[in-house]
Image: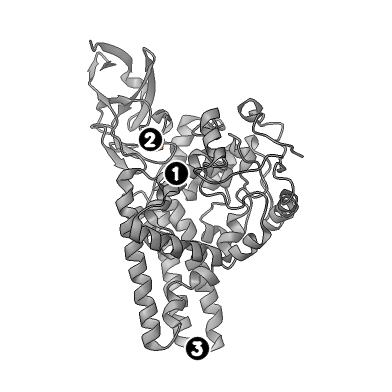
Amino acid sequence: MPQWTLACKTTDIDAEDLIRFDHGGATYAIYHSPDGKFYATAGRCTHEDVHLSDGLVMDYVIECPKHNGQFDYRTGEAKRAPVCINLKTYPVKVEGGQVFIEV
Amino acid sequence: MTHRNYDLLGEDGRRAVETGLATAEWYHSDVPRAVMKDLMKRSDAPAIRDTVIFYGAMILFAGLGIWLWPSWWSAPFWLAYGVLYGSGSDSRWHECGHGTAFKTGWMNDLVFEIASFMIMRNSSTWRWSHARHHTDTYIVGRDPEIAVMRPTQMFKILLAFVGVLDVWAYFKGTIYNAVYGPTEAEKTFIPASGWAKVTYVARISLAIYAATILLAVWMGSILPLMVIGLPRIYGSWHMVLTGLFQHGGLADNVLDHRLNSRTVYINPISRFIYWNMNYHIEHHMFPMVPYHALPRLHEVIKADLPAPTPSMWAAYKEIWPAWIRQMRDEDYFIKRALPATARPYREDLHTAALGAAE
Ligand code: FES
């Protein structure tokens, strides 16, 4: 059963950036978009087993640090080779300055 | 002595997968996130400026070459045009393939396609092969872009300066790709979704070369080929000169780019042609950093890297004897000292893979 899990405070992530969040043996990436919204995806690239948290957020795109593959982190859509498989996304809610993801 | 098998379908590649040497985690120097974010930042301006200069200079040199043709006075202009075409397009292919040169995606893609054609690389195949080069840099049997294989074959190195073997391999491969699609070895690093594009690109490229040859026959002159095709032969020497020192004589089968890559200080004209890829350890460690920020990245992490090689001359003074020795001793490689400020080489990651070092 998915549960809302506290991931971080809203102030933990700069705008247009992301952080890594490890929980229950899995890794997630939490994003703070330029328009102030929060998103969550799987934490590792679908191309190879690389943490996206070292990557670069540009607008609504996360670029993987290994081969520069890109995903739209709002939908998980693979946008640029060498990534071909979409990234899993997770629901996010913000309450009282805290970011929760449903995992 | 271990005999190396570079075949992507061969024994060494299979063993690298088995032992975890393939798609492994590599060493990275520590860079604070805020600094790295600043270094990774994308911008169109430097690449637009450089691209206008690059193609503007090519048009100018080719125009003067055509105007003075067939006089020998045209030769210097062809030489300059050739270096931009046959060498400069390599670094444009490289940076735009990474998608870091421009901020705007279509600009990267456009320059990437043009540069791939000029440098005679199937844009689809090489996008994937370069991803593998970054995953498994100089892992034998995994990396499709190992420039000098062991034992060293000197005649191949010397022929590379005139691009003859590359051009031969390109046309052989392109005809195969146009008829049958990717080869079995190429299929090891190109996903099935990319196979059709390999064929499409091969056919378009062959059509352009066929049209150029027909024009040359019709004109009764090699002039069209001086503009398209031949510069890959008469202008590739600079690409080879700068490309061979990237990894020449250094370790293979290791997981630390400080052991298998080299940063070399070079003159500003070569840096323009090579788009700062002389900062090669930096590029491999952090491929997200655009070419124009590599000198800054170098300053940030140089205390953690072997001392940069001060010139191309110094690089080849070090590489040449290593190549000679590697003709007989495949396990030999150059292992460079780290400064006292650097974190030690991660011997634990690759002790088993390291051979005799001096
Ligand atoms: S590991 Fe992410 S693009 Fe290759």
Quadrant where the C terminus of chain A is found in the figure: top left
Residue bearing mark 1: B131
Q: Chain of mark 3?
A: B
Q: Residues within 10 Å of mark 3 (few under 14, many from 20)?
A: few
**Is label 2's Cβ within 8 Å of ligand 1?**
yes
Is B355 left or right of A39, judged from the image as shown? right
Task: Confirm or deny contact between disc 1 and disc 2 (CB under 8 A).
Answer: yes
Q: Chain of mark 1?
A: B
Q: Can you give x and y, in whole percent of width and height, for residue B91 in the image?
A: 49, 56
Task: Confirm or deny contact between disc 2 and disc 3 (CB under 8 A).
Answer: no
Choose the circle earlier in sequence order: 1 or 3. 3
Residue bearing mark 2: A47
Q: Name the secondary structure under disc 1.
A: helix
Give the CA distance from mark 2 to mark 3. 52 Å
Q: Residue at x 61, y 27 (%)?
A: B349
Q: Nearer the viewer, residue B181 or B234?
A: B181
Q: Which mark is residue B326?
A: none
Q: Chain of mark 2?
A: A
Q: Residues within 10 Å of mark 2 (few under 14, many from 20)?
A: some
Q: Is label 1 on the same chain as label 2?
A: no
**Is label 1's Cβ within 8 Å of ligand 1?**
yes
Q: Name the secondary structure under disc 2.
A: loop
Q: Residue at x 62, y 52 (%)?
A: B148
